[in-house]
Image (tube, rainbow, N blue to C red):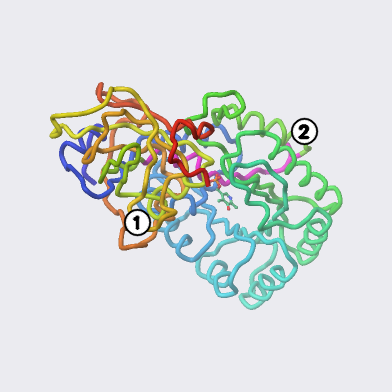
Amino acid sequence: MQRYANARDAVDDLRPDVPVYGFRPAVLKQDAQRFLKAFPGRTAYAVKTNGEQFLLDCLAEAGIEAFDVASPAEFAAARTAKRDAELLYMHPVKAQSDIRLALEDYRIRAIALDHEDEVAKVLRIVRALDIDPATITVFVRLATKGHAAYELSKKFGAAPGHAAELVQRISNIGFQTGLCFHVGSQVADIESYRDALGVAAQVRKDAGVELAALDIGGGFPAPYRDEGNRRSAIPEIETMMRRILKAVDAAGFSDVPLIAEPGRVIVARCLSVIVRVLLRKGRRIYINDGIWSSLSDSWTGKITLPARFLPDPARKRRHGKDELVPFRVCGATCDSVDILSRPFHLPDTIDTGDWIEIGHIGAYSLSLRSRFNGFYPDTFVEIETPFEEPPGERGYATIETMGDSPQDLPEFDRS
Ligand SMILES: *Cc1c(COP(=O)(O)O)cnc(C)c1O
């Protein structure tokens, strides 16, 4: 990857017409190490958040030794990053052939499930491969109710009574037993974790079985631009983790080995995308990226990405005042839903040909981009300074915070 001090330098050098990803390895390592330091248990990075090989390699260099994986491609990528990486196969519903591959070829010994038929699937393969069940930890995924920005517990998890039965069944077979949950993504409040830990404590009590591990999942909040009010203030990971660990103790789990599966909180800040304004039409700008490429995660409207204006120095004449105004941002494809759900606040002087660096897109961006309409951004550069530290006076760390006041943007579609 070519290296630049910041996005301005990259733009001046490349004058890119396609989106360019700005990867910040120093930031990634810093955020990974912050998490490792804040969490006293085993940290297993959730590969689905961003599974690019260069990123996994960088995480391994930063000291990440375990990975939460869900598919053969993720097994391979994690082991390429670190030959002796510990893999935790935490997808509750798996193909038979993938379970065999995990146990036989990758020697994975931690596996999650939430149903007795999945126990039978795993057991059949364990018997066929003549593996001692006591060498495998089977985690029962618990259903939890949460208040996450992204509610993921609707899809997976056993209800408490069912979970206790599963734990007993697994233990009777001779497996080591664990409990796991995942409260969603970008969870800034402690309640979701506290509720889940309460469920886990109940299941442990009802099952009466010794636990080999408690996996508290992911969901830890990344430092996006908060909305400027207390309600949405995003706690630092150290603060959040202190609260979670207190809740872990309160639920009676201080004697059980802990695992966490962070994704977003580790990778969000390490990547930006530099997009070009293909056209300005009044208060609308059309860019060369969108919800079918790097920005689908922002499309849900649940997170607020920071953005920085990078004017084209070749444009000599500009209109408008140098103040921030909201723009509706339209994506690259011909699809009419390809419009960002929130406006961006950018200088009124922005025009066709200018660039915008959109920050903190490391989570759920690269892994979700599609080839829809033939657009597939795949250009990367390395950037040395964090997004938050713009060196030049032309850098505007602006945000799209308006959300609630459609009158500021008459043509904005609130759907
Ligand atoms: C997606 C996922 C994670 C990571 O979630 P983040 O919100 O990115 O931290 C962790 N565990 C499981 C089971 C997941 O599905």
Q: Residue 85 versus residue 316: which sits nearer the camera?
A: 316
Q: Residue 102 versus residue 365: which sits nearer the camera?
A: 365
Q: Position of residue 260 (x, y in %)?
A: 60, 44
Q: Quadrant of residue 133?
A: bottom right
The residue under the point 78% across, 46% down is 199
Q: What residue type is labelled 2?
A: Ala
Badge nearest the viewer, 2 or 1: 1
Q: Mark 2 points at which residue?
A: 250
Which element type, helix, strand or loop, lies under badge 2? helix
- Mark found first going from the N terminus, 2 or 1: 2
The relative height of residue 224 versus residue 371 in the rendered view (above or below) is above
Q: Residue 6 versus residue 333: which sits nearer the camera?
A: 333
The relative height of residue 203 versus residue 224 in the rendered view (above or below) is below
Q: Residue 19 versus residue 193: which sits nearer the camera?
A: 19
Q: Outermost residue, bottom direction?
A: 128
Q: For residue 314: magenta?
A: no
The residue under the point 72% across, 48% down is 144
The relative height of residue 169 versus residue 341 in the rendered view (above or below) is below
Q: For residue 261: magenta?
A: yes
Q: Name the residue under label 1.
A: 333
The residue under the point 29% across, 54% down is 378
Q: Where is residue 406 in the image (x, y as percent from the top left)?
A: 50, 35
Magenta highlight range: 253-271
Q: Position of residue 37 (x, y in %)?
A: 53, 32
